Image (cartoon, helix red, strand yellow):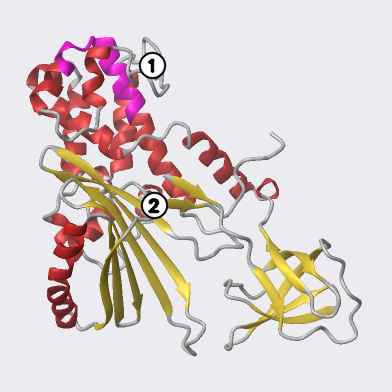
Amino acid sequence: MQINLPPLPILTPVEPPPGSKPWRVDQILEARVGAVKSDGTVTLQIGRQQVDIKTVTTLRLGQSLQLQVVSGRDHPVFQLLPKNPSTNPIQRQLASAMRQALPKQIPLPQVFKLFQQIDRVAEIKQRFTTESRQLIENLVRSAPDSKQLKSADGVRQAIQKSGVFLERSIAQVAENRPISAKGESVQPIQLDVKGLLLRLLASLAKAGISAEPAVKPDTSADKPLVADPAAKMVFDQNPKQLAAKEQAALMKMPQHLLLAELTRLVEGALSRIQLNQAASVPREEAPNTPLHVELPVKNAEQFQLLQIRIEPESNQDNDDETTRWIITLSFEFAHLGRVQTRIALLGESVSASFWAEQAQTVKLFDQQLDGLRNQLDAAGLEVGRLACRQGQVPQPSLRISDPIFSEHA
């Protein structure tokens, strides 16, 4: 996973402020949004001066901004600076959470693969407490499969119980508010992935299991991830490995190492979910922060990662200020290779682009485009461009609006 810091937005005045003194390049200015017009023009109050600007950045009435002058003289240009997270307690907490989660995160398919191996073999399963066994079984069952993800309700339920919304769901239940605003049936909080992981971690802790492996693993590139070389195949994500060999390795693994590694992997999965949660929290200077969701999808003997990114974009070209939604799906299945899909939804209009690295995948997708168009038409949508191209698929990334690392640390 890559983590990208987006470029700072540029604000350009529609025309120079009349009778104003020229600002110095690199000068820092405090501004407040005084008006937001339907044509996309925003009026900023900078000291005693009012400046009309054009920007694609969504700004709210009354919002406080910090600007840096990047070009002065007769035609000033400003750069919108991010708020210093150290002055905002919420942003400071988010920055701290992301710093802690980054080095500990572990991909969810790797963790769920171990859950499945434990759940399938009675001799291994009996090495855990009844509570831990039940939680592991529920986690395996919580992972969606391709059949569930073929329906809109199945996708909605998978996203809802992915762990990203756990705290919000708990708050809604505490306030006696329905979890679903539309009133449809939803998965109970008890089946939320993050909730199950937290309960499993507590169950392992009650059994007296240390969060650190008994023999601390060396994570350097040329050595096994786990301390026991015989157990390395359990954590190897090579899809050609036989399940029987993986199960045999688990059965030979010492009890203390098995339990300690399970604890470490559960913590890594929680860190991964928490990182997605922190990256999805809207910031004052980036109110259209994308929602990041990751799903471990069951595919035969394997679990594979489906990454979902949902991002609203303000459509300033329309007077009704209709929100344009961009949904990006990224996955890499054995028979398809790396694929990324970008779906744009504006009102009842939809378009989609597919990128695939394998030529055979592009051919397969091209054969399905007419059927997809017919299905979207039948759903009452106005279908725009549908296309598939071959090429290098961009690496999925978390876009972070706040500086979470100090260059002076």
Q: Which residue sits at x=35%, y=60%? A: 177
- Coordinates of residue 74 in the picture (x, y in percent): 84, 80
Find disc 1 in the rendering and name its residue: 217
Residue 163: x %, y % from top left: 33, 46
Q: Is residue 247 left or right of residue 257?
A: left
Say which element carries label 1: loop
Residue 247 vertical placement versus 116 (above, below): above
Packing grade of label 2 (10 A; few <14, some 14-19, many >=20) is: some
- Position of the N terminus, as image quadrant, is top left
Amino acid at circle 1: Pro
Of labels 1 and 2, earlier in sequence is 1
Does the magenta-highlighted stretch encompass residue 224? Answer: no
Segment colored magenta: 249-265
Task: Name the residue type under label 2.
Answer: Pro
Residue 269 visible in this rendered orientation of the protein: yes
Q: Are marks 1 and 2 in contact (CB under 8 Å)?
A: no
Helix, strand or loop under label 2: loop
Residue 227 at x, y = what percent? 33, 13
Q: Is residue 185 visible in this depiction of the protein?
A: no
Q: Mark 2 highlights which residue?
A: 396
